[in-house]
Amino acid sequence: MAAVWFGVVCTAALRAGAERAPVVVTPGGEQSYRIAVQRFADDSTAPNARLIDDFRAKVTEALEFSNVFRRIDDAAYLGPLTTPPGRDDAPLECQNWSQIGADALLEGEIARRADGVSISFRVWDASQCRRLVRRRYQQSGANLDVTARRLADDVVEAFIGVRGVSSTEVAFVSDRGGNKEIFVMNADGSGARAATANRSLNNFPSWSPDGDAILYTSYRYLNRPFLFLSSRGQGRPGRLLSRLGEERPQYRGVFSPDHERMALVMSDGDASDIYTVALDGRNLRRLTRGRAIDVSPAWSPDGKRIAFVSDRTGAPQIYVMDSDGANLRRLTYDGSYNTNPTWSPDGLWIAYETRVNGQFDVWLIDPEAVTNVPLVTHPRSDEGPSWAPNSRMIMFSSTRRGLADLYVIDRDGSNLRRITAAAGNNTSPAWGPYSR
Amino acid sequence: MVVGSALAHAGALGLVLVSPGVSDQAPPRVISVELIAPSAAPAARKPAPAPAPVVPPEPAAKPPPPKPKQVVLPEKPQAPKPQSKPKPKPREPDVFKEPEKKQEKSLEELLEEMRGDAAQTPPAPGPAEPATAAIAPSPGSSEGRGALSAEERDWQARVIRRMKGIWVVPPGFRTQPLQTRVVVKLDAAGNILGTPRITQRSGNPWYDDGVVRGLSKASPLPPPPEAGEWVMWFEPGDSL
C-alpha cells in the first residue's frame, strides 16, 4: 500500500517536473577548479624533501598557468599533506577533500633510482569521489621540471578534455642583447634562452610541426632576408632554399602542417608574393600575382588553405585562398588596416591585428567571416598574435608598459597576464606545438 | 667571409636552441606513459574524437639532443660591432609596418571607409563561437513551458544564484554552444537524492561532468516548493 502511494506521488512529481519551466543556469564567476596538490611520497633510495617540495611547487604553478585550476592553501587541508606511502590503488577518503571545497586532488609518488626517476600519480574528482586518471612516467634524467609541467597538462586534460600547454614552448624575437635575435622560452615565460646569436637581424620565428626546429628570417647572409633553420632534431640547421638563389629576398617562411613544404614570401622589386615550396627548394609554386604586396602567409590547420595579407585594394586586408592559390577571397572588410593573420589550431578562428587610431588591436574572425570580434583592445599597440596548441590561449606583444612585452590571454578575452619581464623589446611570439 | 661566418653560426644554431635551462641536468626527454587508467570514468566520458591523452614514448633510436653550447651575448661595451653588421639597419619586410606611410590615407578617406565598414558590420559584443560550429541550442526560455508560480520563480532565482557561485565553468567552455539538461530529485530540504540524471548531453563529456560536479557540490539546494524531480538546463548562453 505504501509502495503504491509512493509511486503515485513520484509519478505526480515527475509530471510536475516535466511540465514546469526548467531552471536555466548560466555560469557565474567561477572559472577555476580548486585543487589540492599533495606532496608526492618519496620512494627514493635517498629521499630528498626539497626535491619533493620543488616538484610540487612546479606542478602547482603549471596548473595555475592553465587558469583551469587554483590551489587550495595547505592550511585548509583535512587530509594528509603528503601522499601516504603505498596508496596506489587504494580508495580515497574523499570527504577530507570535498569538505574543504576541493574539486580535485592530485596525489602520487616519486622514486629516484640510479637509472632514472619514476613518477606515479592519480587525479581524483573529489566531489564525486571518482578517480579520473592514473598514470606513470619514467625518465632517465634527474631534472623534473619538464615532467612537472607535463603532469600538470595531463591533469588539465582530465578535467576539461583539452591538454594544458604549460609544457609547450614559445619562440619570440627579443632585442635584449642589442640585436634582434630569436629566443625560446617555456610558455609561462620561464627558462628563456637564445636560439640565435648572429648579431644580425632575425625575425618571424615559426615552428616545425614536430617542434624540433624553428624557421626564421635572418639578414645574416648578404645583408638581405633569407630563411634559416634552427634545429634540435634531425633537421640540419642553417640556410634553407639556397636552390632558389639569391636574387629575390625570401622571408616569413611557415611550414605546412604536414611538414612537406613551406609557404613564404618572395619580393620582386616593390611587389611581393606568396609561394609554396618543398623543403628542399624544389616545386616552387607562386600563389599570388600582380604588383601588390602580399605577405604573412598562415596555413589552416588542415593545410588546405592559406590566409595572408594583401594591399591589392589599396590598404592591407586579410585574404584566404586554397593552398594552390585557387578560390581567393577577401576576409576582412572592417577597418582599413589589417595584418598578421594566424589560424587557431582547431581551425575555428583567425586572429589578426587591426590598426585603430594609429596603434594595433588583436581581433578574431572566423574563416567564413561571419563573426569578427575584438580580443584585445588597448590604447597602446597589441600585435603579433599566436595561438596555444590547444586553441585556448593567445600570446601577443604589447607596448602597454612602454617597451614591448609578451602577454597571454584566454580566447574569450579573460585572464590577461604578462609573460616576459626581461629588458628590451619582446615581440613576434610563435607558440610551439605539443612536445612528443 | 660572410658565407663562412654564416656557416659557423649555422653550426652553432642547432646547439643553442636546446635549452640550457632544461638540459642542464640530463633532460627528461624520455617520458613514457606506462599506464593510463580512465578506469573509474563513466562510459560516456570518452568523447568521439578522443585525443590520445598519452605522451607517446620517444623512439629509442632518436639521438639525444646535443649538449647546449653556452650562448654568450656580447656585453654592450665589449667589442665594437663587426663590419659585417648591416649598416644601415636593413629594412625588415615587416608586414605592412614599413610601407605604412606610402599607403596612409587622408583622415577623410579613413573616416569614409570606416563609416562604410560600420554600416556593413553589426556590433559584436565579444568573442562568440563562429557560425561554423554547431548551432547553439535554443536558450532556456521559460515561455511556453508552463507558468511558474511566484513561489517557484523565487525558488528558481535562488537556485540559479547558488549554482552560479559554485558551478565552475573554465574559460574555454564559456564561448561554446553547449547545453546540458539534467533532472535532479530533491527532498523537501533541497538535498539532491541520488545522482543527477542527464537527459540531454551537451556533446562535450567534460562539460557534462562539470555540471554534475557542480550539482554535487551545491547540494543541498534551496528547499524546493515541493519535493520531487526538477529539470535544470546548464548553458554558457549569454554569460559573457
Image (spheres, rainbow, N blue to C red):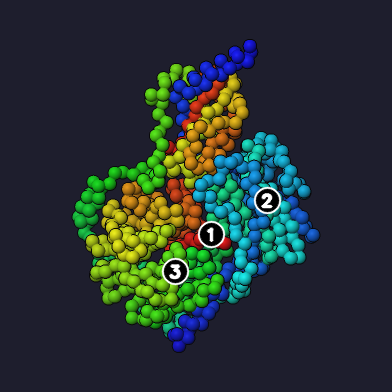
Closer to us: mark 2 or mark 3?
Answer: 3
Three-letter code, disc 2: Phe
SS state under label 3: loop
Three-letter code, disc 1: Tyr
Task: State the separation of the CA atoms marked 1 and 3.
Answer: 19 Å
Chain name for mark 3:
A
* Of callouts 1 and 3, the N-terminal one: 3
Residue position marked by numbered label 2 in the rendering: A121
Q: Is residue A200 left or right of residue B18?
A: left
Q: Residue furthest bottom?
A: B1
Name the spot of residue A371 as percent of width and height, x first: 34, 47
Three-letter code, disc 3: Glu
Q: Is residue A279 above or below residue A370?
A: below
Task: State the separation of the CA atoms marked 2 and 3.
Answer: 38 Å
Question: Image point 68% across, 44% down: which residue?
Answer: A74
Question: Image point 25% across, 63% down: which residue?
Answer: A312
Q: Is residue A208 above or below residue A378?
A: below
* Of callouts 2 and 1, the N-terminal one: 2
Q: Which mark is residue A260?
A: 3
Q: Residue furthest right?
A: A45
Q: Quadrant of the N terminus of chain B?
A: bottom left
SS state under label 1: loop
**Tag 2–tag 1 contact (CB < 8 Å):** no
Q: Which mark is residue A434?
A: 1
Name the spot of residue A128 as percent of width and height, x first: 63, 37
Chain name for mark 2:
A
A387 and A421: which is toward the camera: A387
* Of callouts 2 and 3, the N-terminal one: 2
Q: Is residue A268 left or right of residue B198?
A: left
Q: Which mark is residue A426?
A: none
